[in-house]
Image (cartoon, rainbow, N blue to C red):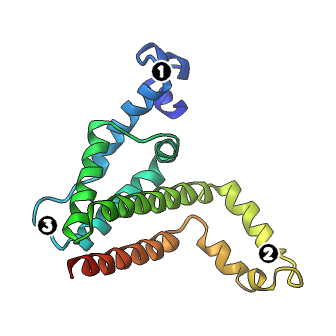
Amino acid sequence: MRRLASELGISPMALYRYFPSKTELMDAAIELAAPEIELPGPGAGRWKEQLAELARALYRAGVRHPSVARERFNRPLQTPRALRVTDCAIALLLEAGLTKTDAVAAFKALLVHTLGAAAFAAAESRPEVRRRASQRHATLPVEEVPSMASVAEEFTAALGGDEAFELGLAALLDEIERRGRHCER
């Protein structure tokens, strides 16, 4: 909110003159950020690739706008553009052969993974967080946490990176594909 107010040249509290509540203000911010998430067109490719690209776009938007990503953990996002993203994802999951119940569960799993990974990446990429974590990793007591100490450099290198997101996304998509094939039988 401070950054938006700064860009507009007004105080953060002045934003509330235009929006009756923080919820409505956040909804407006979500509508502004949503066009960054390009929806695939009909027949744009296999459902798995389209869903992966949709998740990646949502992840990138979540990293760029971490407060919007965190807002989803507080409440469902019901803006028109947010609903179109959800609708597109559900259509792809149904195309994958999932039942309606499994499609909703898969969407929620993808959403939690994507926005959670985005929130972590945004937080971990801040210089002060990286510095403190790097120092902590370098001093891990080998006798108390030997496995963690053995991968301390890798922990530091992974801060703010995309590797964990991509690994989780691949696992989720593979399981969705497996379930879709199972449902078709």
Residue at the image position 37 percent from the left and 56 percent from the top: 58
Residue 174 is situated, as x and y percent measured from the top left of the image, at 36, 79
- Circle on res. 44: 3
Residue 90 in the figure: left or right of residue 76: left
Query: Residue sitting at 45 percent across and 13 percent down?
Result: 17
Residue at the extreme left of the image, as rendered: 43
> Quarter holding the C terminus?
bottom left
Name the residue carrying label 1.
Answer: 21
Give me the C-alpha separation between circle 2 and circle 3. Answer: 46 Å
Vertical order, 105 against 155 (above or below): above
Q: Amino acid at mark 1?
A: Ser
Q: Measure the C-alpha gap from mark 3 to mark 1.
A: 39 Å
- Return the disc, 3 or 1, that comes first in the chain's sequence: 1
Residue lying farthest to the top in this orientation: 17
Q: Quadrant of residue 33?
A: top left
Residue 37 percent across, percent down from the top left: 30, 52
